Image (cartoon, helix red, strand yellow):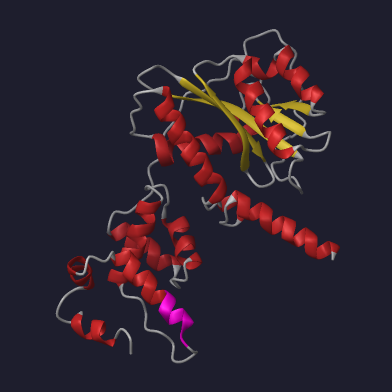
Amino acid sequence: MKYAWIDKLKTVWPITLMCLVLEVSVSGFFEHRQRARQTRPQGPEPRRLSNEALLAHIRAIHAEFKGEYGWPRVWKELLARGVRVGKDRVQRLMKLHGIQARGKRKFVVTTDSKHDLPVAPNLLERDFTPQAPDRVWSSDITYIATDEGWLYLAAVIDLFSRQVVGWSMQPHMQTSLVTDALRMAWFRRHPEPELIFHSDRGSQYCSHAFQAALKGYGMRSSMSRKGNCWDNAPTESLWGSLKVGRLYGKRFATHRDAMDEVIDWLTFYNHRRLHSTLGYVSPLKFEENWHAGQSKKAA
């Protein structure tokens, strides 16, 4: 057998030591071995993965996703990579070795709702599950500390796939911050008229300029009830994932440094991050699967 000599040697030296001497990553070795097993002809059931091997996989995934994943996403990622293991075993091993996702933190609300501008009704009523893409978008603003001062981020989410379809970052909270995010989303997606655009009651979203932009795109404005963050829960969840998973504990010297980090995370979020609401697939994969299903129905 291809790996029989390794199985004999590991009774004398641990796998990790042999990988170190041979200048091979532990996770890379086990991934290669796993792929080799999968391509073999069907035969006896492969031996159970040792705790040492499984821990190497877990550490590699945890490091790859920069400490953002807890045991549920690590387990799903292991399954996606062909490592068949029970979730209880992954949870137990991670707990034993102190491997966990970054802890949750509370953040300050940035909404300025003390104004006399018209407020739109709540058309969403906490229904965050539209049946198709580009039926309902949700938006919000958050902030990021840098040595140059605050950097503000506005994002637009398609609630069907939870994909971030538009964003804007500026050192102020003027109306152009949210208008630019809306414009980016529009040019990327070109949705049909009557899309519901949901936000809080912040002055930026209530402004005449932003409301005129919505009407120009044929969208309907919807706003959360006063002081009720749960009416815009998906964007609140997005901010938590961004700040806890990527930004917490980091110091940015410039606005540009922070912007680069945020853009990197948004790309990761859309393309790769396993989303629990979507059955542990990424937003882009979820939408791709939906389009594939629609094509099959039409065939």
Q: Is residue 145 visible?
A: no
State the extent of the magenta-drawn residues as a range: 35-40
**Residue found at the very far top of the displayed protein:** 116
The residue at the point 39 percent across, 64 percent down is 90
Displayed quadrant of residue 94: bottom left
Displayed quadrant of residue 28: bottom left
Comparing 60 with 24, the one in front is 24
What x and y, as percent, mark residue 297?
Answer: 82, 63
271 left or right of 253 in image: right
What x and y, as percent, mark residue 207?
Answer: 70, 13
The residue at the point 75 percent across, 21 percent down is 213
Q: Is residue 214 visible?
A: yes
Comparing 104 with 157, the one in front is 157
Q: Which image quarter is the C terminus in?
A: bottom right
Q: Is residue 80 above or below residue 241?
A: below
The residue at the point 15 percent across, 76 percent down is 13
Residue 251 colored in magenta in the image: no
What x and y, as percent, mark residue 18?
Answer: 19, 72
Q: Which image quarter is the N terminus in?
A: bottom left
What type of secondary structure mainly makes up the magenta span?
helix
Q: Is residue 21 above or below residue 130?
A: below
